[in-house]
Image: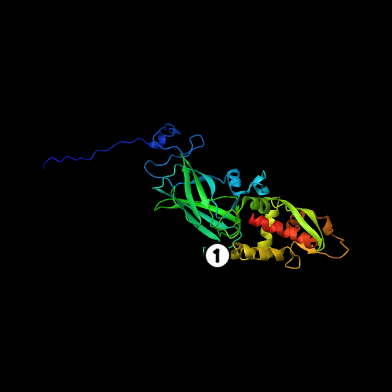
Amino acid sequence: MGKCFSSFQAVFKPNEANTPQSPPRRQSTRRPESLPKPPSVVDGPEKPVEGVEEVLVVKEVDLLLKENGLLHHTEQYDVMEREKDPLLVVRRGQGFVISITLSRGYNSEKDGISFIFTVQDAEKPSYGQGTLMAVPLLAKGTEPGTAWNAVLDSCTENMIRVKVTPAADAIVGKWKIDIDTKLKNDGAVSYSHKHPFYILFNPWCRQDQVFLEGEDLLQEYVLADTGLIWRGSYNRLRPCVWKFAQFEKDVLDCSLYLVSNVGKLTFAGRADPVKTSRVLSAAVNSPDDNGALMGNWGDDFGGGTPPTKWIGSMKILQKYYKDKKPVKYGQCWVFSGVLTTSKSHLFN
């Protein structure tokens, strides 16, 4: 027989149960330098990926109340001057400027900006009713036309100034502002401004139906907050001073309330000065849908104020707006004073 060599080799292993084991090595808790660290307050937010463009984001909007108030003759309004949450008041058909702070510089070739304006009390804003307006930002120097428009006024590192012009037949009342920003052909980001602004009729605008020519007439019939009302019979007339107080607290909001809630004027009607005037004429009288003032031509004025004691519209409209009940009492000249305030408040 030939020799046979086996490749098998026995391996001797000692009994593990009887062999003392060394203690397990403690794992290191130190994070390897190659692993990324989670973001922290100290490190700040993660930097954008190089080469990937970020969508433009609106950081802050300034409605420039002082600047616009002077341009629109609305700087005297209480809502413009109050310390807490002042609101912008402008006139339709005339531009107002807003300042927008952005997350980065604006590039007209890559970025798209649109403004969405909606009437605040419209439950379902729509283009057809005129309660929703989508307005793209136009390049600087663009002729805007007569419709709603927004034109770039100036541009700095991360801030733009935009001139917005409501149409000369825009609905009068409170409006909201939303701003949509996007990379062209990409997703969008929306910003909602927390405060509404007011739009009024504009007697300074030739395209507005209420246009009034002559600065002396505008000063007297629009901006003057006091005047004379004539009382008495046709052969015994005497003047009395009346404080219209159209710029005082709550008077503007009360006038809008009379139009929309008491007179229930449609949105289209709120753009029409004739329909607005007719509705206000009825709304200041209490028999018409619980209006602002209750008439009394008798001798008993118990539970209220005698008509001869009123010297202005402010307290009447403020009390009505607070209680939503007719104020007692009025007679012809008191009704005329309150109506003049309510009308001029919307038309001025």
Q: Is residue 326 visible?
A: no
Residue at horizontal 64%, vertical 63%?
276
Where residue 113 appears, x then y in whole percent? 46, 50
Residue at horizontal 74%, vertical 58%?
338
Check the picture and name the quadrant holding the N terminus.
Answer: top left
Q: Dot 1 corresponds to which residue?
A: 129
Q: Residue furthest front?
A: 235
Q: Nearer the viewer, residue 200 or 122?
A: 200
Dot 1 surroundings within 10 Å: few (below 14), some, or many (20 or more)?
A: some
Where residue 202 appears, x then y in whole percent? 60, 55
**Where 14 sits versus 63, above or below?**
above
**Where 156 sits versus 348, above or below?**
above
SS for callout 1: loop
**Where 77 sits versus 43, above or below?**
below
Q: Is residue 42 visible?
A: yes
Q: Is residue 237 left or right of residue 248?
A: right
**Where 167 sits versus 263, above or below?**
above
Residue at horizontal 50%, vertical 47%?
162
Name the residue type under label 1: Gln
Where residue 66 appears, x then y in whole percent? 60, 43
Q: Is residue 189 left or right of residue 90?
A: left
